[in-house]
Amino acid sequence: MKSHIESLLEQTLESFKQQGIVPADFQARIQVDRTKDKSHGDLATNLAMMLTKVAQKNPRELAQLIIDNLPTSSHVAKVEIAGPGFINFFIDDNALANQLQHALNDEHLGVALPAKQTIVVDYSSPNLAKEMHVGHLRSTIIGDSVVRALEFLGHNVIRQNHVGDWGTQFGMLLAYMEELRAANGEQAQMELSDLETFYRAAKVRFDESSEFATRARQLVVALQSGDEYCNKLWREFNDISLSHCHEVYQRLGVSLTRADVHGESAYNADLAQVVNDLDAQGLLSESNGAKVVFQEEFRTKEGEPLPVIIQKADGGYLYATSDLAAMRYRSNVLKADRAMYFVDLRQALHFQQVFSLAKLAKFVREDMSLEHTGFGTMNGEDGRPFKTRSGGVVKLVDLLDEANVRALELVRSKNPDMDEATITEIARVVGISAVKYADLSKNRTSDYIFSFEQMLSFEGNTAPYLLYAYTRVAGIFKRVEDIDLSQAKITLEHEKEKDLGTKLAQFGEVLTRMTDKGLPHVLCGYLYELASEFSSFYEACPVLAADTEEQKQSRLLLSQLTAKTLKTGLSLLGIDTLERM
Ligand code: ARG
């Protein structure tokens, strides 16, 4: 409906240009917003105010002129001028009912699909030396939800798990693996089942033995120059490390597969070329033996130039070098129109620098959009970065285990008579959803406090609240199994039916806002409001005990569309629904 009003206003603006009311080359970004207050209609625009300068008329006069020139539309019941010159649109109830009826029978729930784009989404991307820990949670689940929403909107989405699998730390790990193999053969495999311990033990050896350290350095050099033995060892290590990641993904219900892994090592062969190309364009400078690029706009607080380091004095490449190669690949090979990077906000400067350099060096097409969709830190209840009691990093599997234990207690206490297998399954879904939803529902750009208590509460904008709301809506249909709704029609009479209908009709707008900026909390907030809107409707409007058969059927359809919208919305957040809980 919003896009319909936008298009009416665009046509009006066109006719203004033809009539010479505004210059023919005038460009306006027409803005239509949902009103906060129902007495102001459903949608409003500030277009009149935007035109005052170019049209040299006062805004109320212009607002009237816009209304006079607005093409007639059966979707609009009434248009009004408000305040200094806002235009309020009241949507026709029948048109709204028809829109909802159409949504019910459409696989995309009536959401208008945008022009198709190829979109690379870089997310999760852990460093493989360590096991996945809480620091990887945000990128993984926020990225996965945006990926799902983009795919729902029909885009060609290419997931890229840009794992850190090529740094100098690999020498240390390989040396340690070699040592373990020599000592206990197959036992080494077992040791790797706990990567965190493995990493720490390797580090201890590295620090205590200079022979070990030398061996580690030899192994990196050998690895990066293609030595077969080292590469074999490295592949084995990565394989085990990646299987750990994929166990976590599976448990989290994250859609990444092994085919989406395209880590730093994948660009190894391109790195020398990146250096040559920058050199050929005269962009490289020397700084203490290293090859760097200075860009005017990047300076320290003190005004000192801040370079991107491309190659170290010893010949080694850096994080930025593989990112430059990756951007070129994403532009030229993957043909991306847009690339989104779900990476900690602490890397903001890195991305500003490499994005601007990639454009400068023409590694990506001029019109390719590069977006660092960053996120804040997940903190403990003390407001400090989330740690174990002893101050160590919290492994993701441990966090999920605890969520599961707590969810089990919760579900059991609510359903004392339920059989154990059902409790276990419900708790699995509740535990994982609670962790995911708590993260997704916060604006990604801020830090947030991780609290099991809050995320497992049935009150407020939480997973249990929404999952429960869904079971209530879906529950209605358990009681009307044999009803035939194929001829049923939605009519909106009661105030609460209209409110629910208006909310339902906003699903598409919400998905657009969510995917434009990569903000899943927009969808969470909407689903929460929808669930609350449904509650008020259900309280005020008896469904199965409606006055007439038509009314009952119409209300059943509204309930059905609510159930579908909640289920689809949650699935786009990567959250499974339950039929009971
Ligand atoms: N592996 C990096 C880290 O753990 C994140 C990589 C993000 N993606 C990228 N293209 N730089 O910090």
Image (cartoon, grey):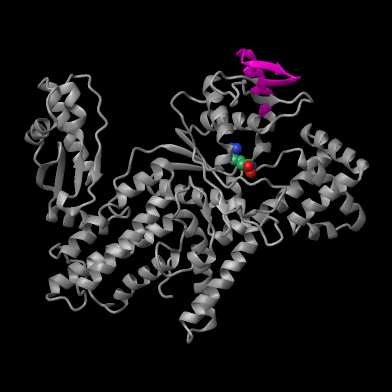
In the image, is 325 to the left or to the right of 524?
right
User: Residue 333: percent from the left, percent from the top?
Assistant: 54, 31
Stretch in magenta: 270-292
Residue at position x 44%, y 64% from top?
463
Residue at position x 40%, y 44% from top?
515
Residue at position x 48%, y 48% from top?
444
The verdict on residue 346 being magenta is: no
The verdict on residue 271 being magenta is: yes
Q: Toward the viewer: 496 or 17?
A: 496
Q: Quadrant of the C terminus?
A: bottom left
Q: Toward the viewer: 176 or 463?
A: 463
Quarter of the image for residue 226 reads top right
In the image, is 200 to the left or to the right of 410?
right
> Farthest bottom residue?
417
Quarter of the image for residue 513 reads top left
As drawn, 61 above or below 540 = above
Residue at position x 23%, y 64% from top?
558
Quarter of the image for residue 406 reads bottom right
As drawn, 81 above or below 565 = above
